[in-house]
Amino acid sequence: MSLKILWRLHQPLKRTQACGFALRTLNRLNSVTANRLNCTTLASSASTQNLLKDWRNCHTSLHNHRCFLPRGVCQRPHFEMLTPLNLKSKTWSLQMRLQSTTTATKSVLKQGGMLGKRTFKGPRTKQPSRTNHPSLEEDMMQCIAYATADQYHLPTLCHDLIAHGFVEIKEFPRDASNVLVMGTENAAKPYDSGTIFIFREGSVVFWNVEEKTVKTVMRILEQHEIQPYEVALVHWENEEISYTVGEGNSKLHRGIFLFNEELDYDQVVLEKFAFSNALSLSVKLAIWEVSLDNFVESIQSIPEMLKSGQRVKLSRAEVMQKIGELFSLRHCINLSSDLLITPDFYWDREDLEQLYDKTCQFLNINRRVKVVNEKLQHCTELTDLMRNHFSEKHSLRLEWMIVVLITIEVMFELARVIF
C-alpha cells in the first residue's frame, strides 16, 4: 500500500520536472532569438510580432501548469507534447520560422524602404529640374524645356499669348516656320530678357522666365494642345540647363550655355533657338521612351507564356492594336521628327549647326535613338510572331472546315448510292 502511494506521488513530480525542462529550453530559445533578431526588424514585421505573441502565450501556459498542477492528477494530453524529443523538434521549427521572417523583413527594408511607397524610374532626360542642383551664382540664369503634347495649334496660340501681354518676336527667319518666339517682361533676373520658344511638335523652352509666368504660359498651352500628355509625366521628364553671358564665343561648356555679350539681340535669339531645338528634341524623345517602356511592359508576359507552352491571352484584334501602337511610335521617332537628321535650317548656318550638334551630343540623343530603335525592332519581331501565329490558326481552322464539308458531302453521296 505504501509503495502504491509513493508511486502516485512520484508521477506529479516527474511531470513538474518535465514542465521545468520545457520552460528552461524555451528560455534558452528566447535568449538566442533575442540576440539574433533586431528590435527595429521586429517592430516593422507584423508576422514576427504575432509569432512572439504565440510564444508568450505558450510560456504563460507552461508557467500555469507548473504552478497549479493538482497533486496526483495526470494531464497526459497536454504534457505528451512536451517530451524532450518533440520539444527539440518544436524548438528547431520556431527558430527556422523566426530566422526566415527576419531575413524576409531585412530584404524588404533593403529593397524598398517603406512598403507601399511608389518609386519613380530614373529620368531619361539629362538634367531634369527636380534634381538637386547647387545654388546658382548671381549672374547664372535658367533655361527649362517641357514637352506637353503631340502638337500645338500655333496661330490661335499666338493670338492668345498676345492677349495675355506677351510680345511676338517677328524678326526671325522664315524657314523656321515650326516655332513661335515670344518675349516677356517678367524676367527672372535682370541680366537677360525673358524669351519663350514654342515648337509646333508640342514642346516649349523658357529662357530666364520667372516661375509664375511659366505656370501662366503652361495653362494657356493647355487650351491649344493636340493629344496632351499626362501632367505628372510632363513635369517628370524635362530639361533644365543654366546659362550666362560673358566674354568669348557662344558655346556649351561643362553643362552650361555661355553667350557672347558683344552679340546683338537678333543673333542671341538665333543661338538660343539652336540650343532650344536640341532641348525640345530631348524632352520629346523622353516622352516617347516612356511610351515604349509602357508598351514593353504590356507584352512582356508573352515570351514567358510561349516558353511555358501556355495559351496567349490575346485576341487577333488586340494583337493588331498592339501592332498599330508600335508603328505609330516608330513613325513619330523615325519619320515625323528631326532625331535622325539635322534640320534644313542649319545647312547654311554652320555656327548655329555646331551649337545644335554639340547640345545633341551632350544630351546623348543619338545613342538614345539607337537604343529606342533596337527595342522597337525586338517588339516588332514579337508582334509579327503573334500575327503569324493567329494567321496559322485561322488557316488551320479553314482547312478543318473544308475537310468537314468534304466529309459531309461524301457521306451524302454514299447514302444516295446505298439507298
Image (cartoon, rainbow, N blue to C red):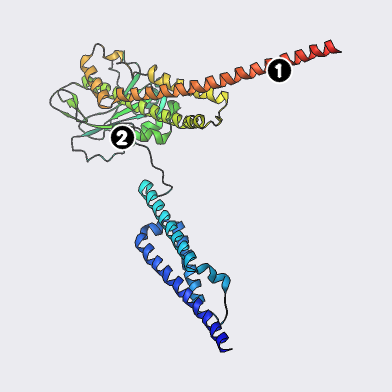
Q: Position of residue 297 (x, y in %)?
A: 45, 32
User: Which one is nearer the viewer's eye here, 209 or 243?
Assistant: 243
Compared with 68, 79 (above or below) is: above
Category of crowding for the residue at label 2, using alpha-carbon neighbours closer than 10 angstroms: few (below 14), some (14–19), many (at least 20): many
Camera sees residue 35: yes
Q: Position of residue 174 (x, y in %)?
A: 31, 13
Compared with 174, 168 (above or below) is: below
For the C terminus, give its image quadrant. top right
Q: Amino acid at mark 1?
A: Val
Category of crowding for the residue at label 1, using alpha-carbon neighbours closer than 10 angstroms: few (below 14), some (14–19), many (at least 20): few
Q: Nearer the viewer, mark 1 or mark 2?
A: 1
Q: Please give left or right for residue 172 compared with residue 116 in the image.
A: left
The residue to which callout 2 is attached is: 128
Residue located 47% across and 62% down the image: 90
Could you say which disc has been placed on residue 247 in the image? none
Q: Position of residue 350 (x, y in %)?
A: 21, 14
The residue to which callout 1 is attached is: 404
- Seen as rendered, the residue at the extreme bottom is 2
Residue located 42% across and 55% down the image: 101
For the residue labelled by badge 2, is the local secondary structure a helix, a strand or a loop? loop
| Gap in angstroms between the C-alphas marked 1 and 2 | 64 Å
Q: Earlier in the sequence, mark 1 or mark 2?
A: 2
For the N terminus, give its image quadrant. bottom right
